[in-house]
Amino acid sequence: MNSRTQKTAVYGMLIALAMILSYVEAQVPAFFAVPGMKLGLTNIVVLYALYRIGFKSAFFINLLRILLVGILFGTGMSLAFSLAGGLLSTMVMMLLKKTGRFQMFTVSLAGGITHNIGQILVAMLLLQTTAIGWYLLILWFSGLGSGLVIGLICGELMKHLDKTKIEGMPR
C-alpha cells in the first residue's frame, strides 16, 4: 500500500472508531441524572491522533467525527454544543502538547475541562444569559474525572499498540 492509501485507511478507521465510541457513549445514561456529563470516550481517538499522527490530523478527525455524528444521530443544538466543546478542547490539547511540558493525562484533563467550557459558552449565547455559568462548576468535576481516566486509558492503549505490528498504523 502506498502512503496516501495508508493515511486514508488510518483516518477512516479512527473516524469510524470515534463515531462508534460516540454512539456507545450516547447509550450510557447520564451520570447522577446531571445533563451534560459524559465519559468522553471519543477523546481516546483524538488523543491517539494528536500523539501519533499530529495536530492537523487530530483536529480533522475530531471535526469530521463531530459533523458526521451530528448529522446522523443529533440535532442542530447537539451539533452546536459538540462543535464548541470538541473544537475548543482539541485546540487546547494541541497547544498544551506542543509545549512539551505536559503528560498525556494532563493534556486530557485540560481537554475535558475546556470541552465543558465550550458547551457552557454556547448555552450562554443561546439562552442569552450568564446565569448558566454556575453549572460549569458541576461539569468541571466530570471533566476532571473523565479527562484523567481517558488520558490514562489512552496512554495504556498506546503502549499496547506500540507492541503490535499493524501495517500503516502510526507509532
Image (cartoon, rainbow, N blue to C red):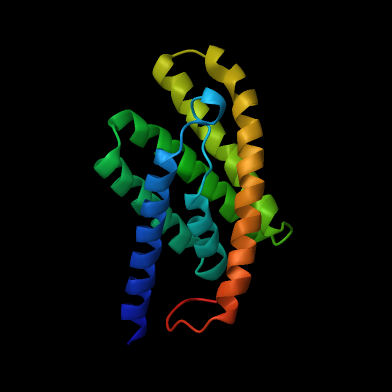
Tell me what residue is drawn at x 41 percent, y 33 percent: 81
Q: Is 75 left, or right, of 130 in this rendering? A: left
Count of numbered circles on the image: 0
Q: Quadrant of residue 18?
A: bottom left
Residue 90 point in image, percent of width and height? 52, 49
- The one nearer the camera, 94 or 107, is 107
Quarter of the image containing the N terminus? Answer: bottom left
Q: Is residue 126 above or below residue 103?
A: above
Determine if residue 96 is in view. Answer: no
Q: Residue furthest bottom?
A: 1
Residue 133 point in image, percent of width and height? 57, 19
Tell me what residue is drawn at x 58 percent, y 77 percent: 162
Q: Quadrant of residue 31?
A: top right
Quarter of the image containing the C terminus? Answer: bottom right
Q: Residue furthest right?
A: 101
- The one nearer the camera, 160 or 2, is 160
Determine if residue 116 is in view. Answer: yes
Q: Is residue 86 above or below residue 16?
A: above
Q: Is 90 left, or right, of 73 in this rendering? A: right
Tell me what residue is drawn at x 54 percent, y 70 percent: 52
Residue 105 point in image, percent of width and height? 68, 54
Q: Residue furthest left?
A: 72
Residue 40 point in image, percent of width and height? 52, 45
Q: Is residue 166 above or below residue 147?
A: below
